[in-house]
Image (spheres, rainbow, N blue to C red):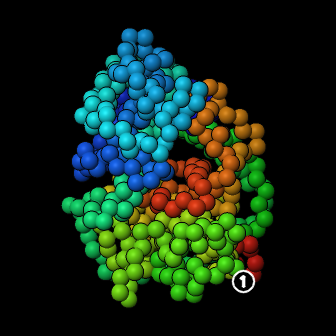
Amino acid sequence: MLKTLDRPVELPSLPAWLQRYREVRSQTLKLVETLGPDDQMVQSMADASPSKWHLAHTTWFFEEFILAQHFHRYARFDERFSFLFNSYYKRLGGHPHRSIRGTFSRPNLDQVRLYRVCVDNAMEELLAREASAEVLRLLELGLNHEQQHQELIVTDIKHAFWINPLRPSYQPERMRVVAATATTVPSLEWYCFDEGLYQTGHDTPDFAFDNELPRHPTYLSPFCIASRLVTNGEYLEFMADGGYTRPELWLSDAWDHVCENQWTAPLYWEQMGDGWSQFTCRGTVPLDPGEPVCHVSFYEADAFARWAGVRLPTESEWEVAAKSSGCTAISANLLESGIYHPAPTVHSRSQRPGMQQMLGDAWEWTSSPYSAYPGYCPPAGAEGEYNGKFMCNQMVLRGGSCVTPRSHIRESYRNFFLPQKRWQFSGIRLANDRNDKAA
């Protein structure tokens, strides 16, 4: 999680850092405005966490790594919180098991909010002084950490509301029903890249997590990558062709998951009469065939690619394509768009032809296992536990989603999840080995 680029931090910019801190912390609270205390207690599965826990844990980070270590006048809000809201940092003295976070009725929500206020006040006092370069480095790390949890707040409460038989809406005041035939998307095209030695990994002075480093050369064979994400309509064709009943399309472990969990469609899809609906942050709506398919696992993405006669891109192929695409976070469908749902790619006279949706809408599964780049060295101390120790049995996703904060995503960003997980906004972009037909 720690950036390791050697760059000076400008200490005179403390007002800008303080403003940035306020903006990120405020955004977190906005995400829970529609949730009551009972909503914020719910933990729908072991992978998810209650919103109340997210509010507390992100606060714990600033208290544990900055205030307790670098502000000698600071007194902890509650000594017990050091253990209670630790996620998985073993070197900091232990933590509760992830699966029981929903049992923490105490402290109550008012106390957690007070905890945030007290830590915010202390951070404001610290940043009003001459903060060291180390404090500002940890501050930047903590803000990016909180932005990761902003995304999790949305994905976790969506899953919690999905398992509720009442199927409540996270955004009830913005409910919108979209006609299932409303969207026409451009045909899928292939964009091809030559064989060569490419530089991949983070390449600017801006913030990056340690797993994006170091920048390194990567040899790539000729390849082609799809111009857009796979749509719901295209995925329906896979399903209609027996996609979930054909073991030849699935990896061995994947087929076991299909059978054991009785998968027949992406998460949040339901068949209603002759059609399909999907559960969204605005409630249940008819399935729009033009929208990108999302909430699919790596296993489902891989099976779809096999059915289509192609494959998933490697993360290096994805990064090379993204950096040449011209796509920017400014125009992408990200958290600040307020949609909290993947949006279709549509024809536009003003839009240059090319690759689309490289940032935002849905995280894109790659065929790359999550492992260290050549020369990678985990940071020292507890910070080194964030990324390096998870480089096992997980697959890399790229590009961000409709609930990723705009200032948080970049082409080199590496997300990672176990291959069977699908409660995140995860989708599919296809790739192929370059040949005359694809080109």
**Residue 201 picture location, percent across and down:** 66, 47
On the rendered image, what quadrant is the C terminus found in? Answer: bottom right
- Residue most extreme to the top: 73
Judging by the rendered image, the residue that carries numbered circle 1 is: 437
Q: Picture coordinates of residue 113 (x, y %)? A: 28, 33
Q: Residue at x 59, y 52 (%)?
A: 416
Q: Inspect the image, locate mark 1, and give the three-letter code of the amino acid beneath it.
A: Lys
* Image side of residue 417 versus residue 393, left or right: left
Q: Is residue 362 above or below residue 181?
A: above
Q: At 64% from the left edge and 82% from the top edge, which residue is drawn?
A: 246
Answer left or right for 248 relative to 259: right
> For this rendering, which residue is in front, 103 or 345?
103
Tell me if mark 1 has few (under 14), some (14-19) or many (20+) residues whose alpha carbon lies within 10 angstroms of its own: few
| Front one among 27 and 88 | 88
Note whether 249 is above or below 127 in the view shown: below
Which percent across, then down, holds residue 95? Answer: 50, 32
